[in-house]
Image: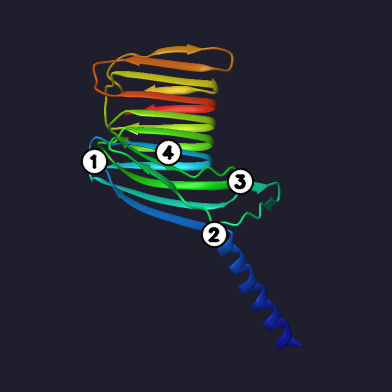
Amino acid sequence: MKLATHIIAIASILFASAALADSEKRISENLTMTEQQSLHINFPVGSLEIEVTDSNQLEVEIEIKPKKNGWFSSSQDLSNITLSKKVTDNRVKLEIDEDDLQQEWTLRVPRSAAIDINLGVGSIEVNKLANSADIEVGVGSIRVDTVLNDFKRIDLDSGVGDTRVTGLVNEIKENRKMVSSEIQYRGQGEFTLNLEVGVGDIRVRH
């Protein structure tokens, strides 16, 4: 009886491990970017963390799994999920347009690349930014840490939430209403930031 119990327990563990492996997938990509190329990213649900580097290599790591609905995860087959890549002389566009997936992106991005990101629900964090960024999130948050203390233009807009800018050389203009918040900044820098969240907070810090 004990032997049978042990066999059942081991089988259960193996089955659970196999099920977990089938319910998650990792995608990795490495691309060489030129100084003329900007980076565009689009996905519906998840998180994105970017670290800016001095390399010309774009390093992409994505973990995907079915999105939870209540107590349960959807039973979507992940084996056919791929990263859509469109590369031109002036743009690299990456996309996984799947609403039923939770996607966790981790990127190392060349300093020369301006970034354009569209995320439906989730969080975006950019570290060591030294270029222009255009980021839109439906529901969630945006955090940008920049090595620059001045920009040509910054526009932050949260429909329901808060906006903050700290550490820049010029004063900011704030417009706060009952639930919304906007910030404008004008300076002598080279680059621009345009960050927008429907519901959530935006932070920019030098």
Q: Please identify the quarter of the rendering in which residue 147 is found.
A: top left
Q: Which mark is residue 100?
A: 3
**Given contact means CB atoms under 8 Å apart, are the residues at marks 1 and 4 in contact?**
no
Return the residue nearer the eye: 95 or 111.
95
Q: Position of residue 111 (x, y in %)?
A: 26, 38
Q: Earlier in the sequence, mark 3 or mark 4?
A: 4
Q: Secondary structure at mark 1?
A: loop
Return the residue nearer the eye: 95 or 22.
95
- Please tell me which residue is depicted at 47% across the width and 33% down the height of the picture: 118
**Given contact means CB atoms under 8 Å apart, are the residues at marks 3 and 2 in contact?**
no
Q: Which mark is residue 34?
A: 1
- Please tell me which residue is depicted at 41% across the width and 47% down the height of the picture: 106
Q: Quadrant of the C terminus?
A: top left
The residue beneath circle 2 is 79
Q: Secondary structure at mark 2?
A: loop
Q: Residue furthest right?
A: 1
- Please tell me which residue is depicted at 35% across the width and 16% down the height of the picture: 185
Return the residue nearer the eye: 50 or 112.
112
Q: Is residue 119 above or below residue 10?
A: above
Q: Nearer the viewer, mark 3 or mark 2?
A: 2
Q: Which mark is residue 41?
A: 4
Asked whether, in this view, residue 147 is left or right of residue 205, the answer is left
Q: Earlier in the sequence, mark 4 or mark 2?
A: 4
Q: Earlier in the sequence, mark 3 or mark 1?
A: 1
**Given contact means CB atoms under 8 Å apart, are the residues at marks 2 and 1 in contact?**
no
